[in-house]
Image: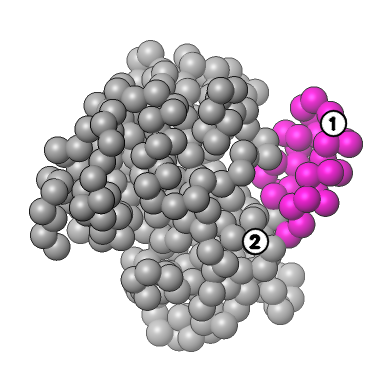
Amino acid sequence: MPYANIDVRPLNPTLGAEIHGVDLSRELDDATVSDIRQALLDHLVIFMPDQRIDAARQLAFARRFGEVEAPHPVFDVVPEVPEVTVIAQDGSADAPYNDVWHTDVTFREKPAMASILHAQVLPHGGGGDTLWSSLHAPYEALSSGVRDMIEDMTADHDFYMSFGETVLKGPGGIEKLASDILALPPQTHPVVRTHPETGRKGLFVNRTFTKHINGLGYVERDYILRMLCEFAEHPNYQIRHTWKPYDLAMWDNRATMHIATSDFTSPRKMHRITLLGDQPYH
Ligand code: SIN
């Protein structure tokens, strides 16, 4: 795929590309934004090294690709730019981590279209890498019998599965949890999702928020969900990123899931923006 305005360097045949020749501290022209959008569709996760921008510039960049989501129900936000979520861990054993495979906010009716993550503080001594997995490639690698079996299945995704305990232990305790549960009831999504822009199909389940597959007995539904998650987590479909200062990553949540390793012992902080998505369909 030729790009007239950016330099795109694919990292592996399944997903991932580095983008050079873009300075996010400046306003981007429409042609450059269109190339970046195309690179995202082609490579699912794109990395832009050494972007020395603040939260307001990250937001300006995000807005070129769509509407920004409401603040996350659990994570802190940057006070002066509340559209930017702060994902911070202090390296202690009881800190919350993102170290279970997930696609961002699939507990919402319209899960995020894309996420944009900017490195703020990286742990001394390394660690805290992020891995992404394509959800197209494992779907395409399933045998036709399994593909046929899951084709019309749906699954419920639930905020409570991952965040329930954190909210319960946090400020507001049980009252905050009750109001979050009312505001964010479980959502039913197809197990196989059609990408709304490329038409490519992919799996749409993850260990963090997918509660169960519907219409099956509880033994079958757990085994099939686990099998699909394990299949999609195979290293064949992954890319791993070791962060450098000021790195920015953008990924397509309609076609990927990700995990951050929790193998570090000093603070790590990232700024994340999620863009509003559409209702998944198949
Ligand atoms: C996320 O899970 O959205 C953030 C991943 C990371 O902190 O590397």
Q: Position of residue 92 (x, y in %)?
A: 58, 18
Disc 1 element: helix
Q: Residue at x 40, y 84 (%)?
A: 144
Q: Mark 1 or 2 closer to N-term?
A: 2
> To which quarter of the image does residue 199 belong?
bottom left
Q: Quadrant of residue 241?
A: top left
Query: Residue 32: horizontal and vertical position, in percent?
Result: 21, 48
Residue 187 x, y percent position in the rendering: 69, 63
Question: Who is closer to the viewer here, 88 or 240?
Answer: 88
Q: Residue at x 56, y 23 (%)?
A: 80
206, 93: nearer the viewer = 206
Q: Position of residue 248 (x, y in %)?
A: 33, 34
Q: Which residue is mark 2?
A: 109
Q: Residue at x 54, y 68 (%)?
A: 280
Report whether 93 appears left or right of 121.
right
Q: Amino acid at mark 1?
A: Gly
Q: Nearer the viewer, residue 120 or 165?
A: 120
**With respect to residue 194, does 251 lie above or below?**
above
Q: Which residues are magenta?
A: 159-186
> Which residue is label 1 attached to?
173
* Residue 183 among those drawn in magenta: yes
Callout 1 environment at 10 Å: few (<14), some (14 to 19), or many (20+)? Answer: some
